[in-house]
Image (tube, grey):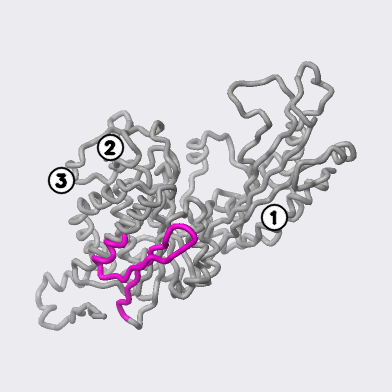
């Protein structure tokens, strides 16, 4: 393979005799790099946005295998044009696309991760003709998003314009950002300072089953020195952000019981116990009014040192503004601020239901009540262990705990019965921000943008590929680049133009560094 070598500029005395050139050398190198990258990006931004439009126009719901393959081949063709080696790796479901290129055998290898699939859609809930027909919009004087013609890209492009479509942000925008950065380097006859592998997950929104099924078979294909996940939203300040970990997730369902069948609330009210109240009392025993979990040893092993506290406090945060946006009077008191609250495992009731699920209301006493719970895990906590702690707490409240509906005999012999069903969990991961890799990434973004990036020790959400991270066992960071208010997973998903511009610049900063 041909290796491109970037010619170095040699400074001679004769060059320094020219005042203009002498002045140039007074400019800090990071500022020169900033201006170069900005110019390259601005010159090609229209083409980038039209490429993004083309990609987002391809529906990406895994239920349609043919369209998913169309997405996969679209990306493969783009990387074929960049002289990458591309291959489709067979999985239990849809294939994994891998693209690889060795620029210099002496360089370190960075494995990048993206996902191609998107969330389900309800077209009736979108403010446009169809979620897969991208629309360019700007806000009017009243702050309402209005359609604008795509040919406005022929003039000055406003960073505050947005493209609305499913997967416009999550995760097709980051795919376009890295792709565009590589295209720009090639156009300028430059090459990255790292060897590159990229995997494209076709089912991240549905559990990453395809990718997870390949970990043993293709572990060597995925081998690298570092792993960078490009997914998720940046800090709401929209400053370059580096996330060094994410919380995991474990789920369970708790069901309490009344009579065997629903009963008329007039005939049996005050006689038949209502399982909703027993469930409510059980849930109330798990948390205090400040939001702290009361389950024994729930927070064991977690320590917020002064160094960690300083890192968490460095993240821009305005409690009053956030609470106002959320519409809450005050936050829970698990942590001293938002970032600190994410360092602890959560306990969330995501849904409560009874036997009646039809239209309207019935005057009945339900025969059961179920609470669906999710627990966001941190690196100090294991999902199975946290589920066991919840189960033991239920027993301590006097419940007979089983994993199925009770028999008639069990109903007669136990005054308090609860069914507890735990599902598969995904544990958290975290790379130290002060590791060599962490420091290098932070330095590159500082040099690329002239200011420190926002450093997130642990983000609140969960990426399904944590088992991949743990299996590969290499330093890993998440580089989130889309706007926080992108309506991810919801109707009217969007990407801010300024984030596409900035994301390309972030990618150039990462690619132009030796690790």
Q: Is residue 498 above or below residue 259?
A: below
Q: Residue, x 48% and y 39% (percent of image)?
A: 321
The mark nearer the N terminus, 2 or 3, is 2
Q: Is residue 130 above or below residue 101?
A: above
**Is residue 170 in the magenta section?**
no
Is there any visible trace of residue 340 in the rendered image?
A: yes
Please tell me whether mark 2 or mark 1 is closer to you in this view: 1
Q: Which numbered marker is on residue 154?
A: 3
491 or 221: which is nearer to us?
Answer: 221
- Quarter of the picture containing the N terminus is bottom left
Q: Position of residue 434 (x, y in %)?
A: 50, 69
Name the residue carrying label 2: 138
Are the residues flagged by discs 2 and 3 in contact, CB closer than 8 Å?
Answer: no
Mark 2 → mark 3, Cα distance in angstroms: 16 Å
In the image: residue 256, left or right of residue 441: right
Give SS at disc 3.
helix
In the image: residue 143, left or right of residue 305: left
Are the residues flagged by discs 3 and 1 in contact, CB closer than 8 Å?
Answer: no
The boundaries of the magenta stretch are 75-104
Residue 441: which quarter of the image?
Answer: bottom left
Q: Residue, x 43% and y 44% (percent of image)?
A: 488
Q: Position of residue 415 (x, y in %)?
A: 87, 37
């Amino acid at each position: 393979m041909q290796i491109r070598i970037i010619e170095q500029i040699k400074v001679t005395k004769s060059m320094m005799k020219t005042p203009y050139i002498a002045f140039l050398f007074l400019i800090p190198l990071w500022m020169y790099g900033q201006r170069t990258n900005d110019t390259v990006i601005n010159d090609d931004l229209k083409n980038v946005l039209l490429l993004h439009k083309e990609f987002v126009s391809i529906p990406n719901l895994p239920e349609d295998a043919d369209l998913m393959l169309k997405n996969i081949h679209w990306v493969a063709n783009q990387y074929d044009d960049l002289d990458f080696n591309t291959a489709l790796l067979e999985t239990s479901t849809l294939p994994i696309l891998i693209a690889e290129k060795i620029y210099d055998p002496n360089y370190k290898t960075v494995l990048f991760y993206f996902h191609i699939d998107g969330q389900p859609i309800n077209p009736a809930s979108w403010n446009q003709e169809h979620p897969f027909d991208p629309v360019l919009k700007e806000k009017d004087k009243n702050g309402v998003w209005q359609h604008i013609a795509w040919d406005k890209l022929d003039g000055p492009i406003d960073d505050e314009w947005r493209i609305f479509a499913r997967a416009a942000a999550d995760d097709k925008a980051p795919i376009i950002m890295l792709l565009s950065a590589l295209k720009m380097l090639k156009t300028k006859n430059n090459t990255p300072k790292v060897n590159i592998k990229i995997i494209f997950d076709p089912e991240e929104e549905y559990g990453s089953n395809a990718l997870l099924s390949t970990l043993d078979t293709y572990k060597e294909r995925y081998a690298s020195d570092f792993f960078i996940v490009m997914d998720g939203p940046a800090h709401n300040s929209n400053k370059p952000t580096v996330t060094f970990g994410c919380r995991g997730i474990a789920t369970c369902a708790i069901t309490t019981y009344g009579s065997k069948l629903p009963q008329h609330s007039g005939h049996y009210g005050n006689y038949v116990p209502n399982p909703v109240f027993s469930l409510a009392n059980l849930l109330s025993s798990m948390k205090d009014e400040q939001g702290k979990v009361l389950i024994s040893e729930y927070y064991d092993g977690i320590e917020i040192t002064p160094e960690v506290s300083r890192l968490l406090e460095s993240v821009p945060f305005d409690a009053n503004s956030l609470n106002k946006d959320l519409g809450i009077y005050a936050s829970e008191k698990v942590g001293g601020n938002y970032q600190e609250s994410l360092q602890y495992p959560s306990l969330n009731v995501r849904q409560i239901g009874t036997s009646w699920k039809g239209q309207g209301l019935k005057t009945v006493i339900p025969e059961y009540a179920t609470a669906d719970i999710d627990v966001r895990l941190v690196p100090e906590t294991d999902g199975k262990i946290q589920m066991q702690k919840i189960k033991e707490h239920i027993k301590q409240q006097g419940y007979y705990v089983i994993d199925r509906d009770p028999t008639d005999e069990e109903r007669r012999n136990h005054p308090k019965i609860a069914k507890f069903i735990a599902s598969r969990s995904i544990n958290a991961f975290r790379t130290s921000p002060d590791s060599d890799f962490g420091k290098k990434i932070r330095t590159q973004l500082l040099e690329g943008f002239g200011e420190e990036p926002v450093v997130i020790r642990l983000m609140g959400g969960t990426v399904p590929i944590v088992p991949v991270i743990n299996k590969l066992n290499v330093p890993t960071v998440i580089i989130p680049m889309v706007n926080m208010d992108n309506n991810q997973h919801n109707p009217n998903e969007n990407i801010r133009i300024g984030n596409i511009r900035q994301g390309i610049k972030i990618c150039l900063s990462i690619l132009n560094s030796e690790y």
